Amino acid sequence: MVSIAADAVGHEMKQAPAYSEFHPRWYRSRVSTYWWLGKWAHLKFILRELSSVFVAFFVVLTLLQIWAVRSGPEAYAEFQEWLRKPLVITLNVISFFFVLFHAITWFNVAPRAMAVRVGGKRVPDVVIAGSNYAAWVVVSAIVAWLLLGG
Amino acid sequence: MADTIGLEVTRYSPERDVQPALQTFQVPLRKDWTVLDGLNYIKDKVDGSLSFRWSCRMGICGSCGMMVNGEPKLTCATFLSNYAPGPVRVEPLRYFPVIRDLVVAITDFMAKLQAVKPWIVRQQEKPLAEGEYLQTPQQMDLYKQFSMCINCMICYAACPVYGLDPLFTGPAALALAQRYNLDSRDQGAQERLTLLSRDEGIWGCTFVGECTKVCPKHVDPAGAIQQYKLTAAKEWFQSLLMPWATK
């Protein structure tokens, strides 16, 4: 008959088994604060996370714009004047590229999160990403038409 | 092709050393030799005290995961010739405590794996007389990819989230939870969701996506976790909008 040690039954595994008085010293290395600088994939990930700050900047900018429009023509002219400052233009250009980066990386990873099945077969990644891009183009075109031509 | 290649191998003796150090060995460079063959050559012919885990040599057992030139790899499926003229650096799996040389402590992963209940949970078992639980090929197809996991922990060594927060359940365990959630025979999704819809569970994942890139069995843990998040978010909205509908 096989005897089972009482310690092994009905208990969770312990980090340091209690029966071993001379438990070996495990070596644990620390993760550097700058771990994301070592590899392009990691740096890209951090930049994507950082891009959310610029997305938020555009949201705040839009809110300020709406507020300026509501406050009358004078306030709106003042707001436009502020937009023309080189510093604000630079910030807007940087933000634009970050938001673009955010959108592209977002659409590229969409197929990972969306497992769409049609007739029992999984829709290929290209189709999922492609339809996201298509929707982006269509929405952008509508917005452009409303602002410029409509 | 040169006839030898240098292997820079991590050595750590818990009794003697304060921290690991590299030791270089020359091993034969043969077209059909993997990094694991090189390590076995060292163990057999040069220094028998070198410690590392391995078993099947064919990418099934998941024991021989190590860092090869800074990338987590199954050493039995990584050919030396791809790294010629070398040297090749072989280190223990990143983010895990090192017990000795290339051997890491896997207790943490084992506990997490068990915690996600990676087995078929039934609220009520069918009587034996009713036969087996049948499944169509389409039903199996839903989870098959996630069931290919061999628990080699290579995805953990690729996951910076796990490195920074050891409490994070991690890619393989979450992918296996999702594998059983998607199984038509399983009824344990709610139990698992309660456990995993936490900051240390699915929401700990920031979608770096490296786990999917390094997986030797093409399991796509990153995809599994994002799909799990989608399910959890839907459940949450449902419980918010229709509290009477939730169990």
Image: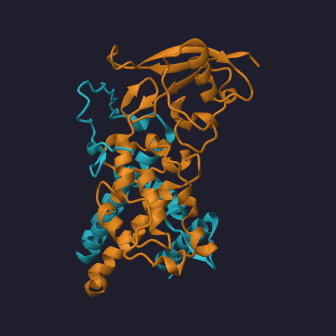
Chain colours: A cyan, B orange
Across and down, in percent, residue B96 comes to: 38, 35
Q: Residue furthest front?
A: A1
Asked if residue B121 can be seen in this view, the reply is yes
In the rendered view of the protein, which quadrant contains the N terminus of chain A? Answer: top left
Comparing A142 with B84, the one in front is B84
The residue depicted at 55 percent of the width and 54 percent of the height is B219
The number of callouts visible is 0
Across and down, in percent, residue A52 comes to: 36, 56
Comparing A58 with B56, the one in front is B56
Is B213 placed left or right of A80 in the picture?
right
Occupied quadrant, residue B11: top left
Asked if residue A94 can be seen in this view, the reply is no
Vertical order, A70 against B47 (above or below): below
The residue depicted at 66 percent of the width and 31 percent of the height is B79
The residue depicted at 42 percent of the width and 57 percent of the height is B174
Across and down, in percent, residue B211 comes to: 49, 48
Is A24 placed left or right of B207 in the picture?
left
Across and down, in percent, residue B126 comes to: 45, 78
Comparing B21 with B150, the one in front is B150
Q: Residue furthest right?
A: B1
Comparing B238 with A24, the one in front is A24
The residue depicted at 29 percent of the width and 85 percent of the height is B242
